[in-house]
Image (cartoon, rainbow, N blue to C red):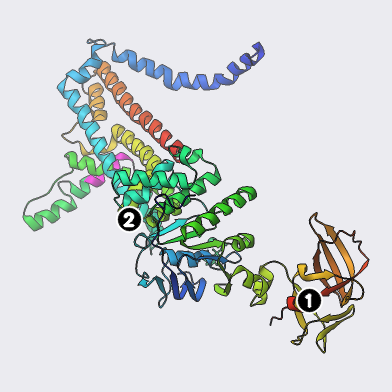
């Protein structure tokens, strides 16, 4: 996309601040504990978490489709938008189900927000053309919605949301209804779009690779709370809670007896550094297969899965504890074999 | 592939019951009706008389106007009420819904009787207005009485259809429209009404057809306005003018059938657009 020619979507984007926004539904369901969240202008924050943790609820509070419980406040920049209904918040929304108007063509869908805002015909036409070309939809302008593929529909939905040049863009699992391949390519397209437009975006997903790829920051949610918020690296390498550690990627957990700066296991001594605890965590890719001289543990292979680009090993480290290791070693591993392994102490995590 | 002899024979055998019923209950009576219509002193011009004779023509026009007005009012009242009942949950809603289907059980005679009780010479409204203004308001035997009666039996059906359709409306569409800046009224115009259109058209057509053919209510009210079914009735009972009654019946049937066919094609095309 060329950004210099007329700048297709020069946006007046703002930051978002949630102040003690909780949500209790009339039936008593506590969907969201009072949360605090600050999103910088132009930043993409991904809300990630298991089903029912309150992601959609938080997004709808930001959008103005739900009111937070008393005391909660939503700010767009310096403006308190809490009392404003969605139609006055000037947001762009993209839904999992696309929510395109079936009685309108692609072009009419994209023009709808401009029409209800009373934009002049000439300007409206021009904006629609801009959006169509930005989303590579030129040849579909006159199509009916039911004549489009899922990926095309979602691009129309994005174009429609962006056509009004919203202050923030809110996306609720926009790719979940698509098949894996399409999801990948549309994810790349959304990424490109968010970077080039520099629009403040809140993106809801329960797919962690989507979250990693798109988020400047990820807010991992658990039972109506934000368990941790940080960059994808922070979330992955320094999970704040066990829940985050388990939810993002996979995590090994080993218990043993503290022995100086090590943890004593039947298979050897695992060096954990000056800070010790009788339980430590580390990621499968941080388990290294080493020479006998460097070995910390002598682990027995329980099963081995050759996956092409790497091999996944399930290893017995004693006391009925198994860990997962991932290695690019080309050796053929057999169940029952003993492998010498080591874990760098920097890769070791301690969590309560 | 060309059907073999055996196959076409089997098709005929399978179609036989349908053909028999069609002949017995549709083709023969209709043919008889059409021929009776043309068999009187006037011959085929009996059909012509429906338009040229001011008595029949005014009956035809007032029936159409009445039915169209009732349909229009019903659609508006039931559309709003149906949407409201579908969207709002309040105390007594279930009871209200259950009672809504009650008028469906009444024959036209009862509906007419109720209109008389309400706005007839001894009606509630008459007594109240007499007490208030010293003059009785009597609507039952005018166009207004018919209008009320027809409205009464039309509204429940349409409300139930609208509610079923409203339940299937995609809430995300309304939210999408609002997010784009649409006011509540614009949401109704651009999302809800298009979404309800097939239901509005089909229930409107049925309402129109029912009103065109309603007899009991009109007969009970014995009004000054002769709606078509009453005219047909009096043609053959009072004047034994069978051919004209038949001609009027055919015209009544045709108009109603046309309205239904038109609605079916309109609803069909909107359904295709919404798929
Ligand atoms: N209108 C509502 N009335 C009552 N409870 C609701 C309502 N909407 C959501 N909930 C409940 O609130 C909780 C959070 O729902 P929410 O839709 O925010 O979850 P989510 O994280 O988006 O989940 P998913 O990944 O399945 O979409 C759930 O327990 C849900 O059942
Ligand atoms: Mg959700």
Look at mark 2 in the image and give the residue it sits on: B184
Q: Residue furthest bottom?
A: A260
In this rendering, position of residue B186 left or right of residue A158? left
**In front: label 2 or label 1:** 1
Look at mark 1 in the image and give the residue it sits on: A344
- State how many labels appear: 2
**Residue A218 magenta-highlighted:** no
> Image point 76% across, 67% down: which residue?
A285
* Image quadrant, ligand 2: bottom right
In this rendering, position of residue A243 left or right of residue B224? right
Q: Chain of mark 2?
A: B
Where does the image place residue B120, in percent across and percent down from the top left? 17, 46
Q: Is residue B158 visible?
A: no
Q: Which residues are magenta?
A: B106-115
Q: Residue furthest front?
A: A4
Q: Which one is nearer the viewer's eye here, A289 or B268?
A: A289
Where does the image place residue B160, in percent across and percent down from the top left? 39, 47
């Amino acid at each position: 996309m060329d950004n210099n020619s007329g700048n297709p979507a020069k946006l007046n984007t703002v930051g978002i601040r949630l102040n003690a926004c909780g949500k209790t539904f009339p039936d008593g369901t506590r969907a969201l504990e009072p949360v605090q969240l600050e999103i910088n202008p132009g930043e993409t924050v991904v809300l990630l978490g298991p089903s029912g943790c309150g992601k959609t609820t938080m997004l709808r509070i930001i959008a103005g489709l739900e009111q937070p419980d008393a005391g909660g406040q939503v700010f767009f920049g310096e403006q308190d938008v809490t009392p404003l209904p969605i139609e006055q918040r000037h947001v762009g929304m993209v839904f999992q189900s696309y929510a395109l108007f079936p009685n309108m063509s692609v072009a009419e869908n994209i023009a709808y927000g401009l029409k209800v805002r009373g934009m002049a015909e000439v300007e409206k036409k021009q904006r629609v053309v801009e959006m169509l070309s930005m989303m590579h939809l030129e040849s579909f302008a006159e199509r009916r919605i039911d004549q489009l593929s899922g990926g095309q529909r979602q691009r129309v939905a994005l174009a429609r949301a962006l056509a009004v040049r919203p202050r923030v863009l809110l996306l609720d699992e926009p790719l979940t209804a698509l098949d894996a391949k399409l999801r990948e390519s549309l994810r790349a397209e959304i990424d490109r779009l968010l970077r080039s437009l520099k629009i403040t975006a809140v993106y809801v997903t329960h797919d962690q690779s989507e979250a990693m790829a798109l988020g400047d920051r990820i807010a991992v949610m658990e039972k109506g709370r934000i368990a941790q918020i940080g960059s994808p690296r922070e979330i992955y390498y320094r999970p704040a809670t066990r829940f985050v550690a388990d939810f993002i990627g996979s995590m090994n957990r080993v218990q043993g007896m503290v022995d100086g700066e090590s943890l004593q296991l039947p298979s050897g001594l695992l060096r954990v550094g000056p800070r010790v605890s009788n339980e430590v965590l580390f990621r499968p890719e941080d388990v290294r297969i080493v020479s006998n001289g460097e070995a910390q543990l002598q682990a027995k292979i329980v099963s081995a899965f050759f996956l092409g680009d790497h091999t996944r090993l399930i290893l017995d480290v004693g006391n009925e504890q198994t860990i997962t290791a991932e290695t690019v070693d080309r050796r053929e591993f057999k169940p029952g074999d003993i492998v010498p392994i080591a874990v760098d102490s920097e890769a070791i995590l301690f969590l309560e | 592939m060309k059907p073999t002899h055996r196959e076409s024979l089997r098709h005929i055998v399978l179609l036989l019951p349908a053909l028999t019923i069609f002949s017995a209950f549709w083709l023969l009576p209709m043919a008889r009706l059409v021929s009776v219509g043309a068999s009187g002193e006037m011959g085929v011009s009996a059909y012509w008389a429906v338009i040229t004779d001011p008595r029949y023509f005014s009956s035809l026009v007032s029936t159409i106007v009445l039915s169209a007005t009732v349909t229009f009012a019903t659609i508006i009242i039931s559309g709003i009420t149906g949407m409201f009942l579908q969207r709002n949950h309040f105390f007594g809603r279930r009871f209200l819904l259950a009672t809504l289907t009650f008028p469906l059980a009444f024959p036209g005679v009862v509906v007419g009787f109720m209109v008389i009780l309400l706005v007839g010479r001894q009606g509630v409204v008459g007594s109240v207005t007499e007490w208030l203004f010293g003059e009785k308001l009597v609507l039952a035997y005018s166009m207004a009485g018919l209008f009320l009666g027809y409205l009464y039996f039309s509204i429940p059906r349409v409300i139930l259809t609208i509610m079923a359709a409203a339940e299937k409306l995609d809430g995300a569409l309304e939210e999408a429209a609002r997010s784009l800046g649409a006011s509540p009224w614009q949401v109704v115009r651009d999302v809800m009404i298009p979404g309800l259109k097939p239901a509005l058209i089909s229930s409107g057509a049925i309402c129109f057809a029912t009103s065109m053919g309603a007899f009991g209510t009109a007969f009970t009210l014995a009004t000054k306005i002769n709606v078509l079914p009453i005219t047909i009735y009096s043609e053959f009972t009072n004047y034994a003018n069978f051919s004209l009654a038949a001609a009027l019946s055919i015209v009544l049937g045709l108009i109603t059938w046309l309205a239904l066919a038109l609605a079916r094609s309109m609803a069909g095309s909107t359904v295709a657009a919404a798929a």
